[in-house]
Structure formats: C-alpha cells, structure tokens
Amino acid sequence: MIEFWKEHSQHATVEEMMLDSNAQQLTKHELPEILEILPSLDGIKVLELGAGIGRYTKHLMGKARHVTAVDFMEKFLKKNKEENSHLGNAEFIQADVTQLEFPENSFDLIFSNWLLMYLSDEELCSLTEKMLSWLHPNGYLFFRESCFHQSGDSKRDFNPTHYRSPAQYNHLITSVIWSESAEKGKQSYGFDTVLSRNVQTYIKMKKNQNQVCWLMQKTCRDSVQQHQLGFNTFQQFLDNQQYSRRGILKYEKMFGSGYVSTGGPITTKEFVDLMNLSSGQKVLDVGSGIGGGDFYMAKTFGVEVLGIDLSSNMVEIAMERAVTENLPSSWLKPGGKVLITDYCCGEKPWTPAFQTYVNQRGYILYTPQRYGKILEAAGFTNVGAEDRTAQFISVIKAELKRAEEIKKEFIQEFSQEDFDGIVNGWTEKLQRCEAGDQRWGLFYATKD
C-alpha cells in the first residue's frame, strides 16, 4: 500500500490524489455535492481520515470548531498543512489509520473520503469499532468509496483497492457493535444508516454509477430489544432474510423483470398514469425496490426520479440495472402530487395467524380509510383512498397461475424448495385477504 501511494504522491497534486486526469473539474462539482450531505458543522469537532492534500480539510475548518486531519502519506499531509494550518483550528497527524488511537467520545463527525476501500474486511471492522468509540453518542460518520470497479483514469501497474459492493459496506459497518468501558455502564452502540447514495457528479460527468457515499449515525444498541432473529437493525433483518439478494430475484421472477411489487409492470403503469407526469418533473419514489417503476417513469415520461429503499440489496440491484438502462438513479413542491400503494388491514379483531404475521414482519398497518385520514391530517388535499383488495386478490391469483406455467424454469434457476416457498407465501396472502385481515390500498393526494 505504501509503495502504491509513494508512486502516486510524487508531486502531491489533486490529479495524483484522485488518480484522475480530470480531477480539477470533478472537484469543482463534487465538493458542494458532498458538503451538502453532511450534518451541520457549526461548532463541532471533526476527525478527517485520509485527508490527503486538503481538498475537504479547508472547507471543514471553515465551519467546524476543530479538525483533526490524518493521512499516512508525508507529502500529501505536508501540502495540506502548508495550505491550511494558518486557519488555526486544526491538528495534522501523519499516521496509518489502523494504528490510530483517540480517547472515547472525542469527535462529533468522522469524515472519510476514499479510505475504507484500501482496508481488508478485518481492518475495516476493527476501524469501525474504534470509530464508534471515538464519536460522541449520536455523532456521525461520513464515508465515500469506489464500488464494483475503479473510476480514475490513472495507469496502475498495481492496484491494492478492495472494490466492494454497497451492500458489503452496509453489512460490514452496521454489524459492528462497540460497548463502553464497564465503569460507564456497558452501553452498546452501532451505526445506523441515515442515507446512502451515488455521487451525482460522477454520473453526470463520467456516466459512472460506482461512486457511493454514506452518512451513518452512532446509536444505542439494546441487546434486549434487538430486532427479529437477533439482527441489530431492521435493515439487517431485511437484507439477510426477506430481501436477501436471492430472495429479491425470486420475487422478481414472479412479479416480472425489474419489479418486486404486486402486479409488476401492469399495476405500475396503471397507477403511474394517474399522476399525469410530464417531461422535466421530479419524482421521489419511496420504497423503490429494484427500480423497474423508476425506469418506466424516466423512459416513458422524461422525468427525473430519485429512488429510496431501506434494503441495501434492493438499491444495489437497482444501481446495477441503471447502468444497463443508461439511466441515473427533493421533496414535494407546491402543486406536487403523491401516489402510494401499500399494505393495509381490515378492522380488528384480526385472526391470531394475521396478528402473528404482522408481529413477525414488524408492520404497522392501518385500514385504507384510516390511511387516507392520515394523509389529510398531514396537510394534503384532494386525498383519494381506495381499497384495491379485490384487484390485489386478482393479481395474486394471476401470479400463482403464472408460477405454475414457469415452474420448471423457476426450479432450474432456483430450487423446488424456493418454488414451494413462493407458492405457499402467495397462497397465504390470498387467504389473509379473503379472510378480511389483509387489505391493499391506493392513495393519491396533492400538496397545496
């Protein structure tokens, strides 16, 4: 690793540090994008890991109370210090991050840009545990990495980078738990994901989807109140159980290419058409799955879509599909419209089987009528709340019929056990709906 960066730090230029001949232009557009993602820097203490020549250091110093800038390359750190030490509120440390030590609860924000991809899984987990100890409770970690493949155009005879997938970073970092020393009561902490997204500058300038950044927060982990099956977060539960990569692809086989939602492309087209979209509009898709609906809206109507999903496996697959679709992956303006389809419930009392199902999934369900009232209470107007359970039942029956038609193909691609699991799951959905417990709602409204 040291030899690699010695070769690429001869003159301590931004081109060397970013391993890209177009570094100046990339920096011009990337800096404001990244800084906008960060929490407020006013009056806080920041630890910058992999600070390099100071692309971000001077901006962090401009607002933070104090910045500790760390890099293991002497020439990079020397230039950083020469250009920024006059600001007076920073300490510059030349060190290997895997050997760093700081007191507990020393920082409010840890900022890292292109560093973790140079660590092994073991080193990454060890550093994550240390970062949890260095941050104040509710402090933030920001990091950005190259995923899947390299981005820069610099020639590399040797490349020590670990090009992980976003899901791998999510799993490795959110799985780590750190406990305070015994005299402080043994409180345990971990990282929760606040957001994870592509760096838009690289999409626009290089058609490159593989630059991904995260904002995570240090939060309490209560061992007594851990989520289902012992996972630390609900996201971990989803990504390892219901929405494992294999599980998602099984659902897609049932719903249709690009879809993991009821009715797939047929219901998507029906519901999206209700919104009267037009070119130039912006759409926020909450619960975007693997992107089929987003690609449909972008291609058909020329809208710009921002897809959000809690499952990192969903987002990763959507990112992969966005590349093949040649599509890049704001809150509502006045006059904007919202459209929602969601699981709902019938009036209580529910059957014991349905209550168990809801508890296992961690769902909070409302009747379609109550769901509509919540939208009205939130300030939306022209609210429409439709019980589409009859359509839901019809779609489930059609999907079960299709399952039988593709049974041989499905089993060849997955397994008999997987096929049985899908059919049983769909049959149970049908039974819950026919019993009146599970409902399906369509909701639409306008923001004045």
Image (cartoon, rainbow, N blue to C red):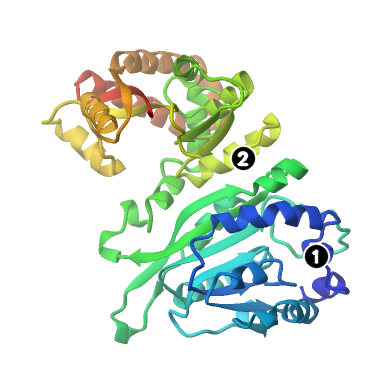
Q: Residue 369 lies in what quarter of the image?
A: top left
Between residue 61 and residue 212, name the one nearer to us: 61
Is residue 27 shown above or below 344?
below
- Direction from residue 303 to residue 155 in the image, left or right: right
* Residue 83, position as x, y percentages in the image: 75, 77
In percent of the image, x 56 and y 27: which residue is there? 281
Q: Secondary structure at mark 1?
A: helix
Instruction: Say whether residue 189 is visible.
Output: yes
Using the image, tell me which numbered label, if any, was put on residue 14. 1
The answer to whether residue 355 is left or right of residue 250 is left
Name the amino acid, label 2: Met
Q: Which mark is residue 319?
A: 2
Quadrant holding the C terminus: top left
Residue 99's place in the image compared with 211, above or below, is: below
Q: Position of residue 40 (x, y in %)?
A: 49, 63
Mark pair 1, 2: CA separation = 28 Å
